[in-house]
């Protein structure tokens, strides 16, 4: 069985990168930033903050299952909340 995701040996990585870059250039022009972020420029900020406060008041039960690993205490102390 062969892996269909593997590139063939006769195609170099440089050729693949060049092909990908050419696809990006030929895909057309990017939209103007004013068009992309137009909907974020206007709106009631105070109303948005109240909506977030409503969501924060909803109680949620969360269960997290952690896998097994071995680590030193030094590595454990380096872990941050995330």
Image (cartoon, grey):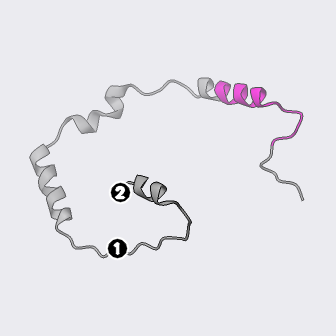
Q: Quadrant of residue 34?
A: top left
Dominant SS in magenta: helix
| SS type, badge 2 | loop
User: x%, y% of residue 4?
Assistant: 81, 51
How many numbered marks are there? 2
Q: Locate residue 70, reporting x and y percent.
A: 56, 65
Q: Which residues are magenta?
A: 7-22
- Horizontal arrangement in the rendering, residue 69 relative to residue 32 (left or right): right
Residue beneath label 1, please? 62
Determine whether, in the image, residue 36 is placed left or right of residue 46. Answer: right
Q: Which of the 4 quarters of the picture holds residue 68? A: bottom right
Q: Which residue is mark 2?
A: 81
**In x, y percent, where is residue 5?**
77, 49
- Point out which mark residue 32 bears: none
Asked if 43 appears above or below 15 in the picture, the reply is below
Question: In which quadrant will I find the N terminus?
Answer: bottom right
Which residue is found at the position 26% from the left and 38% from the top?
39
Mark 1 or mark 2: which is in front?
2
Residue name at image x 18 percent, y 37 percent:
42
Q: Which residue does the image show at 19% across and 63% down from the upper left?
A: 56
Report if residue 33 lies within the magenta region.
no
- Dot 1 lies on which element? loop
Residue shown at the point (83%, 53%) measured from the top left: 3
Q: Residues within 10 Å of mark 2 (few under 14, many from 20)?
A: few
């Amino acid at each position: 069985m062969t892996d269909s995701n593997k590139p063939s040996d006769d195609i170099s990585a440089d050729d693949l990168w060049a092909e990908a870059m050419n696809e990006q250039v030929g895909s057309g022009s990017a939209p103007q930033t004013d068009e992309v972020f137009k909907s974020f420029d206007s709106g009631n900020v105070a109303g948005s903050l109240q909506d977030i406060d409503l969501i924060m008041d909803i109680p949620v039960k969360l269960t997290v299952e952690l896998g097994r690993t071995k680590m030193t205490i030094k590595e454990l102390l380096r872990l941050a909340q995330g």
